[in-house]
Amino acid sequence: MVMLFRYKKMVLRRIAFSYLFIRSFSLLTFYFFIFCSFVYFFSGISFASLNLITRGFKDKEINISKFAYGLKLLSDNSFLELSPPLLESGLETRFRDFSRYYLGRSYVFLGLYDEAQKYFLSITRTFVFYEQVLHNLVFISYQKGDRSVCEFLKQDLIDRAIPEIFEVIILCNESKIVFLRERGMLKEAEELKEKAKKVISRYVKNVLDPVDFIDYSGRLKRIEDLSFRIFGVPATQVLSSSEREEIAKLLFEKGFYDVALKWTQDDLMRARIYFGLQDYDRALSFAEKLTEKITDSKDIERLYVILIFSYARKKNPDLINFERFALDYIKRFPGERLAGDLAIKIGVEKYLVGLTSEAYNLFYQASRSPHKDISERAKYILNKVLGFKVSFQPDGFILLIEKYKEGFSRLKPSDISGPATVSNDGPSFSFVLTPPSERIEDLYFLKLYLADSRANQIVRTILDSWNLAEEEKRWLISFGFFKYFAPPGDFRSTFAVYKPPPIAFYADFLRASSEFGVPISLLLSIALIESHFDVSAVSSANAMGVMQIIPSTAKEIFSDWGLPFAKDFLFEPSANILAGAYYLSKLKKFFGSWLLAIAAYNAGPNPVRKWIQDNKNLYCSNPEIFLENIPFRQTRFYVMRALSYYLEYSKILREDIDVAGIFGCGSEEFESKFK
């Protein structure tokens, strides 16, 4: 293993030298050189492989990964000049028509209409977006000066149109309005202007909810320009109040908060927008005025969420009002997941200051939650901490805590109830590993690479267009495929566990596990939560790759390895997984506990050090209370989910669980650090 890691270091040095040599090249050249360097030097490692599926290295895996990355660039409307060469890789896969379509779209955006037309004309009529192909050809004809398309469109609003079609309709309307006015036909011109309002409305909605999943938000400014040309005022003054509020809601849901403010006159929407902008004082200024005015139950629930979190998160937190509205929320909306979470969190705080009766009432309310994970957490605390005879069914991280309290230092697969397994030349698994068809295997890869991207909807479209055989459906189900589309919002803050969890890059994770002594099941857990195994993931905090490593942290890791660092290295899965495993092992050595290492991986070492120094006895005696008391909501759920996935992956891989190592209490490594 030492020799293997030395070889890795040698390879990375060679790549780093190559990087320094080509720094003067263009950005495009640089990206392709880095990509090709990794493919060349790591040719023994499957670049995009789900290595649990037994097969050799295949070029198609690289083509799928490059195609997916091109889709992500296109869907995000960023680095468009880089997307065509990447999208071309899709021509060598089973997604050829999708590749041709998105190549055409990329060339339309770049203004290269002849290239775009070539790809659109090569698409078969059975393609799921063929209607949009025709729309593109109409737009290209208009851009080339063919005004006869105005008659072809007949001023109708086209369902499922690309945004450019609406622009063509508006420009055709503009020409006709001018024509009518010049001939004194003012009534007809005004009627056409009224029709143009509907086109403007549909244009905005189409931009915000496009058929082909591309980010067209940049066209909102273009819509304003067109509105001024025809009406002399911005679009916000052209449409009716109900249409404006509908558009404001769409803008809000898409995260265009600043733009949404221009469209809405509704105080609740303004409060929600300012909350989204993290301007909590302004959010409260609107929300507080509405507490006695709103009667709709859904709106009241939304209002309470804004009030609760704004009081807690504003610069000078108002904990009195936070608790007042939180307790009222728990009573009003007992079926909501947030109600159960708040009941447990506040209940723990009451318990820690000796208010046992109030804590019991809150835990009892949470135990009646319709969400099983919440009710089981509450029941466990009622039984194990407060001593009430409440039955519970330990699972996930609660099962690990229970085994820790029972004195287990190591948990064998036979010690926990898991699914029946089927052998397949390696570890035992609860599902058949070999895919029933190559197309299903390819689709699985594509989905992995498009997770956490708006482009992942393409996978749904492909799936809907295929007539799946029963064995294909069973295989996808066994790999958690249908459960695995990322839910909206910050996935790491949502306490949800997929069973069975998907697995990717098994050989790379196994190698990293052996190199640095991190359980492979734990590494897979972190990767799933962090990126869904997406090699090109970049977070708002600039964390990158499969293990979501921040460049400053990666620089320290590479320095420890004696290697120069380039950010692009983090997009190579093998290097990224090695770096993540190294960093996690480093945190484990620092804290003496996998649980604390996981928390530090998410929140950073400094906050975790303070939490454990202030609560060491609580951590070792009642880790469930320590976990529920973690101040950062995201980190609280992050640790719970990581430990729960650790358990699930251990069941699949038949790997022993290091219970003593999870908590660390009593070990020399842990005790020497937190005396």
Image (cartoon, rainbow, N blue to C red):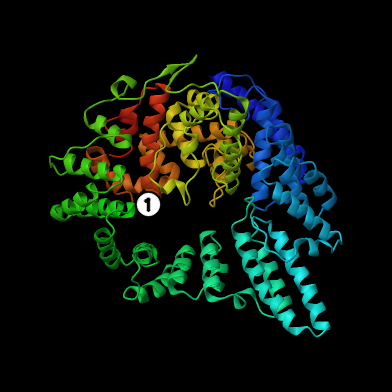
Relative side of 418 to 525, left or right: left
Res 216 → quadrant? bottom right
Q: Name the residue under label 1.
A: 632
Towards the viewer: 241 or 456: 241
Res 641 → quadrant? top left
Residue 20 shows in the view: no
Towards the viewer: 246 or 617: 246
At 56% from the left and 39% from the top, the residue drawn is 534
Percent from the top left, x then y, of residue 237? Answer: 61, 78
Residue 62 shows in the view: yes
**Position above or below: 455 against 93:** below
- Secondary element under disc 1, as helix, strand or loop, is loop
- For the C terminus, the quadrant is top left
Percent from the top left, x then y, of residue 331? Answer: 24, 60
Residue farthest to the top, as pictured: 425
Mark 1 crowd level (few <14, some 14–19, many ≥20, 10 Å Cα): some
At 26% from the left and 61% from the top, the residue drawn is 332
- Say which amino acid is labelled 1: Phe
**Position above or below: 173 against 500:** below
Towards the viewer: 410 or 467: 467
Percent from the top left, x then y, of residue 211? Answer: 63, 52
**Position above or below: 261 against 572:** below
Residue farthest to the right, as pictured: 145
At 44% from the left and 46% from the top, the residue drawn is 492
Res 64 → quadrant? top right
Percent from the top left, x then y, of residue 115? Answer: 83, 47
Relative side of 370 to 497, left or right: left
